[in-house]
Amino acid sequence: MAPSHDETPFPTDPRGRLAVAEALRGARTIAAAGHLPLDGDGIGSALGLVHALRAAGREAVCVIGGPVPRNLTFLPGIADAVRLPGALPFVPDAFVALDGGDEDRFVPMLPLARSARHFLDVDHHVTNKRFGTASWVDANHAATGLMVLGLIDDLGLPLTPDAALCIYVALVTDTGRFSYSNTDPASHEAAARLLRHGVRPDEVLRHVYRSLPRGRLDIAAEVTRRLATSPDGTLAWSEVTLAMCAEAGVAPLDAHDAIEVPLALGGVEVAALFREQERGTAEPAATHVSLRSTTTFDVAAFAVARGGGGHRRAAGFTAQESPAAAAARIVPDLQAAVVHHRATEVGR
Ligand code: 5GP
Ligand code: MN
């Protein structure tokens, strides 16, 4: 994610970029996958790369390791992707892990990734752990999709309309439709280029942000009803429980965007969404915690300290408890961290 205008740029990684491009150039067979849980940037990056490689006559396949969010099932190439535990048509020389800062975001794909000669980690998270045999990590990019666009150029691959569409979806979802602080001139320049390669923004809007099932709107209403705030109003949080999802007929993964509800409230500086995760009957409760910051408060640091990761203004982690228990434990910590941040910032 690109730094916002009030923050210093991140280091670039030209050597990582060269190493990844070199490995891809030499690989006869390539598999690409987005991190789990799948999102627009992860899957858009993987499919975009695969479309461009195939258009150049290369053997490439997209690997899907978990459920695809409903609003992304329209992406071209989804039907041809290999869904694990399905078998690949080849043993990949290179496995490209996209948009995931940590190996643990690719768990079902790890045996496959580790068996490849090259395990390539291409990512824009500042918290990336450089887990590949080669890693290209550059947090100056608003989306990993833009790094894929860079690789397409480095390798001289054709930017087909399908590749352009997938990369556009990566970009539009990770920038919050070109509105988050990571939106920079490069995001808009890339968007212009992608539009020249056939992308129809209104079609993307229709598929990604509209076409919602009624239950998704019911979830938003319930998330709003359960919205809680700190006494000073700078912290807002809510929850998505499995019971809410069952009632609304919506998969928890498809309620991920509900973080926009607490974030939309005036005066909010830090928003959190506690989203209960699907699990087997014998498994204990687990909750995905999404965090967003509208100030210089670094939610990535907060998430890393709890086993997660992300960007300075958008990060997350998993808590091994119910949403209510997670909120009761984590909100006070978050509040204390924000107060501490304010105090140290004033002192600077
Ligand atoms: P979200 O709240 O939308 O799930 O995640 C916000 C950002 O933090 C995304 O860039 C996402 O990849 C990252 N993130 C969320 N959860 C985790 C996690 O458990 N581990 C790591 N490494 N990153 C995460
Ligand atoms: Mn991303």
Image: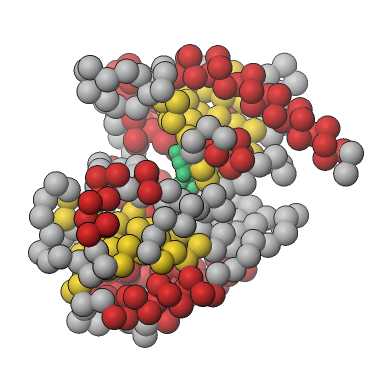
For residue 325, side relative to residue 70 (left or right): right
For the residue pair 106 and 66, the one nearer the viewer reads as 106
Residue 287 placement (x, y as % from top left): 41, 25
As displayed, is residue 61 above or below residue 209?
below
Picture residue at 27% right of the left edge, 20% below the top:
283
Picture residue at 60% right of the left edge, 59% below the top:
2
Q: Image quadrant for the C terminus?
A: top right
Residue projecting furthest to the bottom: 156
Q: Which colour scheme is used?
A: secondary structure
Picture residue at 77% right of the left edge, 30% below the top:
340
Q: Image quadrant for the N terminus?
A: bottom right
As displayed, is residue 28 above or below residue 313?
below
Residue 142 in sight from this viewpoint: no
Residue projecting furthest to the right: 347
Residue 97 position by quadrant? bottom left
Count of numbered badges drawn on the protein: 0
For the residue pair 94 and 10, the one nearer the viewer reads as 94
Residue 227 placement (x, y as % from top left): 55, 20
For residue 201, side relative to residue 262 (left or right): left
As displayed, is residue 110 above or below residue 15?
above
For residue 5, side relative to residue 226 (left or right): right
Residue 104 placement (x, y as % from top left): 37, 44
As displayed, is residue 276 above or below residue 32?
above
Picture residue at 48% right of the left edge, 52% below the top:
129
Residue 46 placement (x, y as % from top left): 32, 61
Residue 295 in sight from this viewpoint: yes
For the residue pair 113 and 220, the one nearer the viewer reads as 113
